[in-house]
Amino acid sequence: MYDGPVHPPRFPGLHRRGFLAAAGGAAGLGALALAGCTGPSGAAADGGGKPRRGGKLRAAFAGGGAGETLDPHLANLFADAARAKALFDKLADFGADLSAEPRLAASWEPNAGLDRWTVKLRKASFHNGKPVTARDVLYSYRRIADPEKAFRAKASLEPLDLKASRALDERTVEFALKRPTAEFPNLLAAFGAYVVPDGAHDFDREPVGSGPFRFVSFTPGRSAVFRRNDDYWEGAPYLDQLEFLVANEESARLNSLLGGQVEYAHELAPTTARAHEGKGQIEIVRLRNSAMQSFAMKTDRAPFDDKRVREAFFLLTDRKELVDGALSGAGEIGNDLFGKGYEYYEDGLPQREQDLDRARHLLKKAGADGLRVTLDTSAVAAGFTEAAAIFRDQAAKAGVQVKVAMGSKDSYWQDTLDSGSLCCYRSGAMPIESHFSQRLLTGSTTNATKWQHKDFDALYQQAQSTRSKKDRAAVYARMQRRLYAEGGFLVWGFADWILGTARNVRGVAHQAPANTLDWARFDKVWLA
């Protein structure tokens, strides 16, 4: 996160920008869930009676200043992602359990070797009336993969051989892959993998998408106004208009909601939620399991190159105290694995609890009596500095001296990727398979724990080459049991993502983690 200009004057605010979760990055979220009584992903929502058409909803987000863009392939901020979702579509998106669900893709089917997939498109049209075709899909993906550009979804689409991929007809794409990829649908759902018209490149003057809203106006760093797309393939939105307004300070978003200047406020603090929940003035929505909270231990260097030390640190931790203190209770405890509640999560393992005697025993066996270690942290993410202080005190009870070192907000994620041995870490929602591939393989570029094991890599490739979902799940379970026993991520909690709405807003899903289909899903929202 970094500093930027403040816009507009009526929303005086902070310079901090809310980034979506990248590997090792912001709470990406990361995610807000707006859907009908039951969204496409099955997320329960606040129905509030029969939906009605009409009205304008104003939504306040932290923004990116004068450099903001409506180019969906450049989206990095929460506001970028919400605007992109209103204007454009992807072939697939993630449901509440982070499994891929069809969107513009009506179906996908692999060959026997899982290295060639056929995707059939549903009947859908762009805002200019032209149909969405296979040519548009290939143009979009090839644009994202341009080696001269830095588009967000480029890394996610790396398994695709786009030169060998082709259009079989107007609504059928044959994707060639560089290697067997059983979780191919996750590529289609990747953050930023939006389909745009063939040849499109200027998105800030009059962008044309296939999404539920049409472009009206855009002033970077200030406002974006969209209107209902009556021809949307999934049904026209209830709202007549949708306006995104920039309010960088959380207090500005809250005060605008309380004062009636907006009907929706993104990214509220746990203290705000406690102060207003159930009081009747505004509605508070908590999106569970939206951000993994952890400490990352580097497994390639002392003292954490000894798995007994890593296990001891698992046992030093009082997870409930961390959730209550660092997250103000706005979350639930973790069990040293990513993806609680997501598809393939190994939930049959015993919940790990603090055991100081066992921790002392393991440290003694490892020759680490009186261990001293530095814990890197920063104000880069909410709760980081509090978590570091709480863990320092917990470790001291077992004779471990933890020195807390404050890092720069501007360079923290890069600094801690390779340096140090222990740091505060968090991640937004993504499929468990993506967590493996991005963070836990020998060649992963955001491998914060330096977990590098050829046999673990081989298990991942085995899973990707396994056609049966049941058999694939068994491989993923085996990988997670290994991480639970000796991995480098000490996952102590999962934070709620909190948003607020006016009392007359209906259709907000309550069970969609950050980064899922029903986040910022304004086409299913209505005003009572």
Image (cartoon, rainbow, N blue to C red):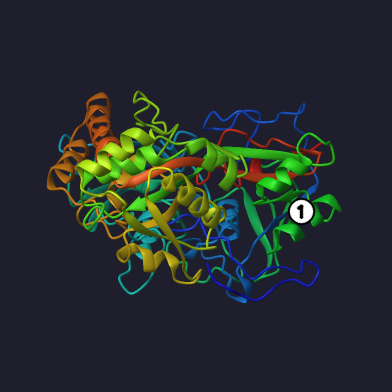
Instruction: Provide the residue designation for mark 1.
Output: 254
Q: Amino acid at mark 1?
A: Leu
Left or right: residue 380 versus residue 499 is left
Residue 512 at what x, y percent from top left? Answer: 55, 37
Q: Residue at x 49, y 72 (%)?
A: 410
Q: Residue at x 47, y 65 (%)?
A: 74
Vertical placement of residue 470 versus 304, above or below: above
Q: Residue at x 60, y 59 (%)?
A: 79
The reply to whether residue 54 is visible in this rendering is yes
Q: Which quadrant would the C terminus be assigned to in this image?
A: top right
The reply to whether residue 513 is visible in this rendering is no
Q: Residue at x 61, y 39 (%)?
A: 329
Residue 417 at what x, y percent from top left? Answer: 34, 63
Residue count near mark 1 (Cα–Cα under 10 Å), binned few <14, some 14–19, many ≥20: many
Front-lying residue, 504 or 491: 491
Q: Is disc 1 placed on a helix, strand or loop?
A: helix
Front-lying residue, 56 or 245: 245
Left or right: residue 161 versus residue 106 is left
Front-lying residue, 274 or 429: 274
Vertical placement of residue 228 versus 35, above or below: below
Residue 17 at what x, y percent from top left? Answer: 59, 65
